[in-house]
Amino acid sequence: MLALEGAFMIPALVIALALGEKASAAAFAEVIGFCLVIGAGGIILKADFNKVYAKEGYVTVALAWILLSLVGALPFTLSGSIPNYIDAIFECVSGFTTTGASILKDVEALPRSMLYWRSFTHWLGGMGVLVFILAIMPRNAGSGTGFHILRAESPGPSVGKFVPKMRSNARILYGIYVALTFIMALLLIIFRMPVFDAVCITFGTAGTGGFGILADSCASYTSAQQIIITVFMILFGINFSIYFLLLIGNIKAAVLDEETIAYLAIIAVSTLIIMFNVRDFFPSWGEALKNSAFQVGSIITTSGFATTDFNKWPELSKTILVTLMFIGASAGSTGGGLKVSRIIILLKSSRRTLKKMIHPQSVKHVRLSRKTVDIGVVHGVNIYIVVYCIIYALSLLLISIDDFDFTTNFTAVAATINNVGPGLGAVGPAGNFASYSFLSKLVLSADMLIGRLEIFPMLLLFSPGTWKRAV
Amino acid sequence: MFDLRHIYPHCDEALQKAAFHVASIISCSSFTTTDYNLWPGLSKTVIILLMFIGACAGSTGGGLKVSRIIIMFKSARLAIRKMIHPKSVKQMRISGKIVSADIVRGVRVYIGIYSLIFALSLILISVDNLDFTTNFTAVSAALNNVAPGLGDVGPAGNFGKYSMFSKLVLGADMLIGRLEIFPVLLLISPATWRKAR
């Protein structure tokens, strides 16, 4: 794993060398060497670790992500771009979890190789989820909700059964991901964005991350470029199995997918409301539509790019954006948040509960895209939301020690646990997280990981029961 | 109390104020002896969380109720244990008694619906363009039957600034919170009336 990360750093090294940034080149070289040594050691030691059950799967994922982030942060510190290691961890976790929250005051001051590495972590993180959750997770993943939802929804790629098939499944998703990324970068370059910018922005969009390479995020790009970014953000927020369905020609199933319909409907409605709400801020309706669509797309897919400082928008728009942060993208996409399918299941199960009160003896199932959702999945969703609230409250409490205003704290937690990036108030699109204390930065980094890995892997890692049985 | 120490001349005065407000907020009585809007961030956040937790079930207080919170925590722990031992059969206990699975499920659904209503009300009253803290705590104060929030609706302010529409929304929230959501939802649900024919 580490060897892999080392390999991923090589392009960054090349860029550093090409541009003559000596300090960063040395830093990358050191870390690559370190990764290769540890990685090689790991391969030799790994021989006796063969049985992977649900528990081991979760723990592996959680540990891998923590390790990746700790190592990924090294180049920032070693090269002196971000002198403090905790800041570097925050930045790197935010990259890998595709959050895009930054503690940097002046992004443009970073060397380009560092900017590239920052954006590349997004792309890795976005793909990582697909690979880790779909490829590494064993078939019987207990009550792994996201996994089950994904499986319940995707009749095309039958997830699981045995290893070779799982691997080919992961490979298909990879393929779609790489293809989409490539198309987007190409389009951006065609519309006259400098190649370096285009590649970085594409990485940020593909992983729904949101690290820009300019201090004003996407505000200084042309309208055509912004529209491309908007469209692709929304595309990357759709369940990837839909693309697979389209590819194998099962268009009917793809079009009728309830989650995608709901997802697009939410985007359309929010965009409309916000467009009317912010009309006065922009010279024309077209401008208002473009900016609100960009912002809605950026927030619901949890990318967190900004074309404008939405902190200054009226309260209705801001509240809608905050709500969108929680809703998030579709299950099985690279976006974060609670996921649209969970919200749908939550709504439907609430309706079912009401019906049960009127007809106590009735037997009703929750259905999604005309298929019955397993009762275990429904419970899983309910539990997920409960645990989510608990963690949310706890983090809010911990970071409120820093004495910022409530809006800042509330949206800082929302932005990190949902992997969005910018919040409101002091952490809005024009601000950053630099003013938080180290404790808060660590708490927020943990939140990002928890949000990215869908809570349970991290909780399992810290539950004493996990280790008791492992002895 | 420790967080407030600097605002008050003596430690015991800080203790007295802190205890008064914690009790006042958690039991949803909402008497105040001082404007806690001016307190530091940590204390304010604690107070907001207390609003949600609320008093004990079967008392006269509002909020989510302590027993629901306990069930929430225990069911989260149960879910984790189930992941480690997928075949295990475990039951939840409170005060040594087993809590039936239906009740646990009820609590989870309750919290789900509660969040939905919360988000909806928040969007509706944000039309008035007051700041986020005010809106957020106004909804939580209404839904949990507390009364004062933070910001403009803090102990020193009141809800007078809101438009008629928002006042109706908040009024509905108070009823929903007091009656524990389901009665009000059933009232609006079409199926209820269909059967009544």
Image (cartoon, coloured by chain):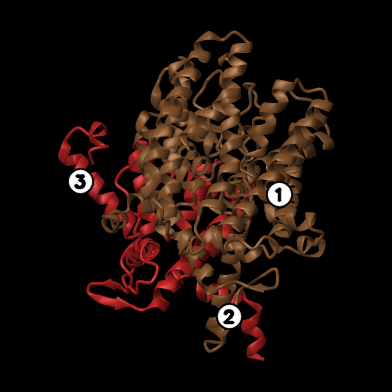
Asked if residue A292 can be seen in this view, the reply is no
| Residue type of the residue flagged with mark 3 | Gln
**Residue closer to the observer: A409 or A52:** A52
Task: Tell me which residue sits at (70%, 23%) in the image.
Answer: A197
| Residue type of the residue flagged with mark 1 | Ser
Q: Nearer the viewer, mark 2 or mark 3?
A: 2
The residue pinned by badge 2 equals: A355
Q: Earlier in the sequence, mark 1 or mark 2?
A: 1
Vertical side of B188 occupied by A91: above or below: above
The residue pinned by badge 1 equals: A270
Task: Tell me which residue sits at (23%, 72%) in the image.
Answer: B95
Dot 2 falls on which chain?
A
* C-alpha span from label 2 to label 3: 48 Å
Q: Quadrant of residue A244?
A: bottom right
Q: Any idea which chain is the red one in this picture?
A: B
Q: Any idea which chain is the brown one in this picture?
A: A
Residue A102 percent across, percent down from the top left: 52, 28
